[in-house]
């Protein structure tokens, strides 16, 4: 990771770092885009997205990070099924797993809603 940072700084380059590890992403990046099923769901400054996630998928990723203080019996708060990505859902790809799903989420892909220089694809932020 330190070598990646050195190369980035020395050569003024950009990385596309694909990971589920938000701590690692936070360590090496200034901006982050959280994807699910090939679609960006939340984009913004790394600290904003990691420390105060807005999209339900980003919130779940943060909760899933290892935590030595979390009880084994504590659930992550997500009960849905992972969708079949060969025939993905018509609407939001995260809808089958989302605790905040609305009827329109099933049929319409949400546009980006801008919240404080962050872009979130979720109807929760429509207004």
Image (cartoon, rainbow, N blue to C red):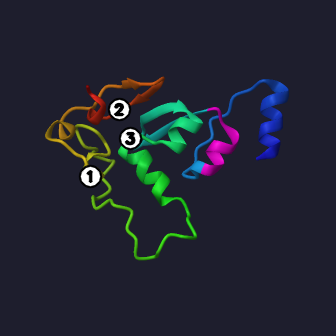
Q: Which residues are magenta?
A: 23-30
- Residue at the image point whose x is 42% and y is 39% from the top: 38
Residue at the image point whose x is 39% and y is 44% from the top: 37
Please provide percent x and percent y for residue 20.
54, 51
| Crowd class of label 3 (few under 14; some 14 to 19; many from 20; radius 10 Å) | many
Looking at the image, tell me whether mark 1 or mark 3 is earlier in sequence order.
Answer: 3
Q: Residue at x 41, y 53 (%)?
A: 60
Q: Is residue 120 magenta?
A: no
Left or right: residue 28 versus residue 97 is right
Residue on which the image places disc 2? 121
- Identify residue for label 3: 55
- Residue 29 included in the magenta stretch of the image: yes
SS category of the residue bearing label 1: loop
**Along the viewing direction, whichever of 70 and 107 lies nearer the viewer:** 70
Closer to the camera, 14 or 57?
57
As helix, strand or loop, the secondary structure at mark 3 comes to loop
Nearer the camera: disc 3 or disc 2: 3
Q: Which residue is mark 1?
A: 99
Q: What is the magenta segment's predominant secondary structure? A: helix
């Amino acid at each position: 990771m330190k070598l990646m940072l050195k190369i980035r700084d020395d050569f003024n380059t950009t990385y596309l770092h694909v990971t589920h590890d938000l701590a690692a992403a936070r360590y090496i990046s200034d901006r982050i885009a959280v994807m699910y099923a090939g679609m960006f769901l939340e984009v913004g400054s790394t600290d904003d997205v990691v420390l105060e996630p807005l999209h339900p998928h980003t919130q779940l990723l943060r909760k899933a990070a290892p935590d030595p203080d979390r009880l084994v019996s504590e659930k992550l708060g997500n009960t849905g099924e992972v969708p079949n990505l060969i025939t993905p859902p018509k609407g939001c790809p995260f809808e089958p797993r989302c605790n905040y799903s609305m009827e329109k989420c099933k049929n319409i892909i949400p546009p980006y809603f801008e919240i404080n220089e962050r872009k979130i694809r979720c109807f929760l932020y429509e207004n």
